[in-house]
Image (cartoon, rainbow, N blue to C red):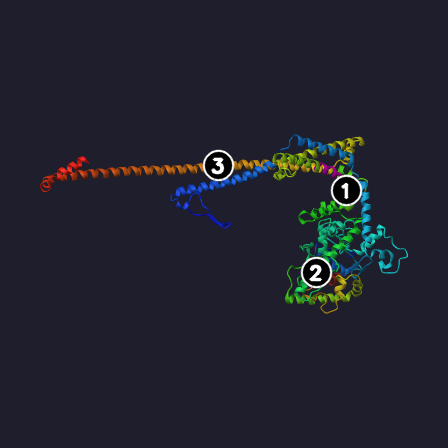
Amino acid sequence: MGTIVDFKSSCNDLDVEFEIMPLVDLDSVEDVRQRHIIEGTASVDELLSEAQVKIAKLNSNIDRLTNRADGIDYAIAVTSGIITGIIDATIVGEWNFAEVKKDTYQKVNSKVIDFAKKQPNYESYCNLALEGKGNPRINPKDPDRLDTAIEFLEREFHLPGDGEYRSGSFGIDGNTHRIDDLCHHPTLVGLVSCIIVQFSGSTLYVNKYGEDINIPIAVNEYGNFVGQNAITKLFAGVINWFITCAKTMAKRKGHLMSDIATTASLPGSFLSTIAELASIPCFRNEDFLMKLRYAYKNGIGTDKNQIDLGAFNKLFEGAQSKLDVTTETAVMHELKRQAMPVVINEVLVRASYFIRRFISELKEKQDVKAVEWKNVIPFNNRTIVRMMTIATGTFTAIDMADAAVHAATKSVDTSTFFSNMLLRVNFVGVGRFAVAVTIDARMGIARAVKRNQRIKLQEEQILLLDAKVYYKQAGMWIAAENAGVTLEQAYGMVEKTTDIFMKAVEEVKDSLDSIEPMVPKIEAKNPGLVDDIIDQLNSG
Amino acid sequence: MDSKKMAIVCEGKEISYGLNLLHLLQYKNDMEIFSSEVGSVISAEIYSSAAFRHASISKNALKIFVGATQNADSSYSKVFNQYGMNIFISEAGFILKADDKKLSGAEYDNFILYANKRRKEYFDLEKKYLDRVEIFDSKWVAKDFDKTSSEGLFGIKNASKSIAQQQYDCLAFVLYLDYLAKK
């Protein structure tokens, strides 16, 4: 029988040799049909084993995707939703864009002034004429004033290409150039664009019509090391690149700090990202790009060239609504406030799930080490997802009820009712509920798909087992055929034996008959011999 | 035809060609605007294609399309064709276009000679204007025109400027000297 694998291992001076051998040595099987049956059966067994592994994996996934929440789990989810809903209604309260935007302005302005004060030349700039290089100013500039800080930063951190759009009519104006020019975007793309400008010597704007506007500019010459041979040239190139990148980043930061506090302000990271995506050639749409610029320049509302969001306009009332970095910061602040009860809801439900499962596992296994953590961790299973759906649904229901009650007391008609209601809606909660429902539904679909896959695999297994039975039957028929042949051979042998026996009897008889004529001669030559032989034969 | 208004239309990377043509006519910075002889009698403005379509520009204004912004259809006739540089003219205005084909060898050397000759003509014609430009701009007009060597603007084959850029720069001189200054 041939060896498939063999290997040796030594342990404590003892050499152990292993050999893996097939159950049936195919080489020793001469019948082609039997060889085929053995091979076919082995292949079916292999397929059955693969199907079994897949089914085991599917079973594990189906188990994860099956909701096993009980009454206590549901009660916990509902209770958590109610508690956090009450927190939302009493503590978080109403959306307050106007007040937050005012605070944001103050914070931004203080940040810009503080940034300017940290610059080494700021003091001399405020006190000395000729931009810090001349005699003392008759009227020194107040370092705590925002306009002084902006003026200084604009001068100190000039961004290459800033203002180049003015060299022609390119569909770019002073109010929108900070969204048209990628370098002004407070995003990674903005930073990369700024560095590319430094190397390419031309600035790129994407205007409101979706056109690329490449304008050659004078760039700052930062890194100017020069190498004398190939190696030092390469080295100098790398050093120059790093210096250029570092200084560009520093300049850009300073420039953005000056822009952020100006009336035109800067687009925030949200608007910038949308503008960058909308600038990708295959997505470019003139109407959309125009609307982005309206949102940035004129804000949200019902006035001419503003973006009308219908009932949602109410959220931006009471302060300048142009979609700049301060508006985005104010909106983020409000969303963070709204996120507080949503996070508490999340923590309560997940913690309860964890504690219940942990206690149950501990009771069953009687040892912390034996706890199966995948049964305890409150993530990535249908039970916790369903609990979260119920908890966030309850939270949103309470939030909506609270918003409706408040809106009803404040509103005079249906149109004002909805806008007043929006002011108390927890958008983070609504978003979280939508996410929970989506995940729950998606898991349901995934479970159905996996169940179908399992049924298909089981059907395959039945077919494979059928195939195996057929192989066995074929083997049985071959064995029966072999038995028949053997019997026939045995009959043939018996016949041959009988023939041989008959022939032997005949020969003995002939031999005896041939002795009788010779008796007188024997008696003559050997008297008494015949009688002795007869006596011996009789006595034998 | 109203010769007081001129629109230079270009887009994308070809804006640099249009800007160089504009600088032959006028220069403006935050402080002031000053012009060459031709630029003093016209009001030139550079536009991107879409901005040009959205702007209300008089039909009588002189339009100069640079590069791919305008196809030279049957309404245009070719009035200049040397060293891969073309000028088309029609009632609507001019088209300046350089062929995609790269100049090489002797053809390129002859082009350099021709371009330097036209540069010198412009330089002689607009000396006063150039003296002022170079105070403000170190990038293209003043810096490159300040070169007094015989090679001048077009002398270095492996210069950072591409051959296409050199062709468009030369086309700007040709247009200025042969068509705009003589009107």
Specify the segment rendered in magenta: A332-346
Q: Main secondary structure of the magenta part?
A: helix
Q: Quadrant of residue A487?
A: top left
Q: Residues within 10 Å of mark 2 (few under 14, many from 20)?
A: some
Is A274 positioned to the left or the right of A109 in the image? left
Residue hosting label 3: A463
Q: Which mark is residue A333?
A: 1
Q: Looking at the picture, do discs 3 and 2 lie on one chain?
A: yes
Give the SS element for disc 3. helix
Q: State the separation of the CA atoms marked 3 and 2.
A: 69 Å
- Find residue A378 and report its horizontal and vertical position in percent: 66, 38
The residue at the point 39 percent across, 37 percent down is: A476
Q: State the separation of the CA atoms marked 2 and 1.
A: 41 Å
Location of residue A423 with respect to A134 vertically, above or below? above
Q: Which mark is residue A206?
A: none
Three-letter code for the amino acid on which mark 3 is drawn: Leu
Give the SS element for disc 1. helix
Is B163 positioned to the left or the right of A32 in the image? right
- Find residue A354 and report its horizontal and vertical position in percent: 66, 37
Three-letter code for the amino acid on which mark 2 is drawn: Ile
Q: Nearer the viewer, residue B66 or A107?
A: A107
Residue hosting label 2: A239
Three-letter code for the amino acid on which mark 1 is drawn: His
Q: Residues within 10 Å of mark 1 (few under 14, many from 20)?
A: some
Location of residue A384 with respect to B69 vertically, above or below? above
Check if mark 1's residue and mark 3's residue have beta carbons within 8 Å: no
